[in-house]
Amino acid sequence: MQITRNTHDSYLILVLNGRLDGSSADTLADAIEEAIQDGNHQIRLDCDAVEFISSVGIRTLLRFYKQLKGVGGQLALSAVSTGVNEVIKLAGLADFLLDNARDNIDRINAALRSNAPRQLGNFEFNVHATSDIPVVMHALGDPQKLGSVQDELRPVMLPRHTHAVGLGCLTDPTSDDASRLGEVIATDGIAIAWHTDGDVRPDDVVLTGAMVPTVTFHSGLIINGEYGTMATIEPLPDAPHATALSNLVVNLMDLTESDAVAFTMLVEINGVVGAAIRRSPAVLTADPFAFPAVRDNVMFTTERSVTREVALISGVASRRCCGPINVYMRPLSQENTMGHIHAAVFPYRPVPKGMLAIHPTVNEFLQAERPIGVFHCIVDDREFDGIGETEVIRGAVWVSPVSVDESTVGGARR
């Protein structure tokens, strides 16, 4: 089978020529998958020169029809040969793949263009909701404290409109929480923790009915409030394929006209660069970063640990001094910019476009597969061996200006 790509307005046309059967279905699947990874969620197949379609070909069409429908997109057949038309109708799929396909695509595209996009840095921002109401950040614990910390661990309930990053574990009355403390990310009723008690992959808890995720924190930052701005981002045509996370964070500050922001994003990434503790800080008695013990205490991504995957990224960043929470912040690659950012990495799936809510969008990824890992995002700027930082391709972001509750220092109120 021969496949040709043509861009038409705001959707992509794949022109097929040949038989769509068991020997060519994988070729079509690869072409559609590549198109989706390039950000095309509105795809039309020109099948006028397809002389035959088998049940394997139909299953391939259905698989991508369902996948794109799940992210607000559509796969449709724009032109079909007589033979393909008969098979599609006999299979009872005409209403899904043929009828009104063009109208549905045009309607979706019109909705996506309802707000004029903004260009910031290497991205086009399609803003679907905006508000300058800030969220409030609280500090918990002392990230520099090691050893016996059992009396200072703090169980924190994390309901909707609450976000967190830090070191902790999913609260479990039957376990020794102090020995399990690891990297934690939480957002809008969803908490994910990569425990240090031997778990190969992270565990998670999702708000369900009266069951609210609870995390026992060693230290961390808690953000309370609903994000005011939601946007989807796409790389500009002449921009690099992927952009450093620090640059995107600065774009979010410009978008909200704020020097300090809290944010969550679900984005396609070109490799995560980060670190994750291997041993709970409760069992450490000396500097975990001292050589050679650091090799046992902390895992660093010496090369991009995953490529072309999806990451749930949450954190805070500031272009100014953050007073009592400076101890929680780390330099980003942009001058005078600090941040504390965690990422939970998932196998690749396309991120939906349009107006999205955090909880159902992230929960859908969790339902499909567990995260690969949870990392504290870092900038590896070593002169010769450095691998840079996490790079973002496209996705969805939620962000607000953030204010600091300065009555919380070390988790205690003054």
Image: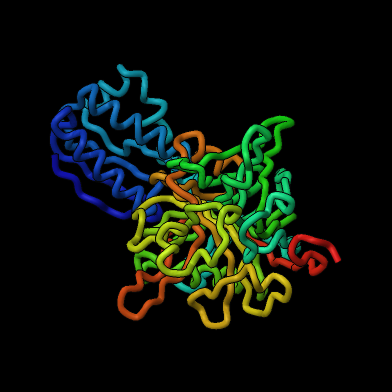
- Residue 26 placement: quadrant: top left
Placement of 283 over or under 341, stated as above or below: above
In the image, 87 versus 339, the foreground residue is 339
Q: Which image quarter is the N terminus in?
A: top left
> Which residue shows up at 23% across the image and 36% down it?
47
Please give the name of the residue rendered at 68% of the width and 56% of the height, measured from the top-left corner.
227
The residue positioned 43% from the left and 34% from the top of the image is 100
Taking the view exactly as shown, the residue that stands out farthest to the top is 90
Q: Return the residue nearer the eye: 290 or 185.
A: 290
Q: Can residue 266 be seen in the rendering of this structure?
A: no
Left or right for 312, reference 20 = right
Location of residue 379 by image quarter: bottom left
Q: Quadrant of the C terminus?
A: bottom right
Image label count: 0
Where residue 375 appears, as percent x and y from the top left, is 48, 56
**x, y (%) of residue 349?**
41, 44
Q: Is residue 312 left or right of residue 302?
A: right
Residue 17 drawn at (x, y percent): 15, 40
Instruction: Give how far across and how far down residue 270 sits, in percent.
Output: 37, 59
Is 16 above or below relative to 161? above
* Quadrant in which residue 406 is drawn: bottom right
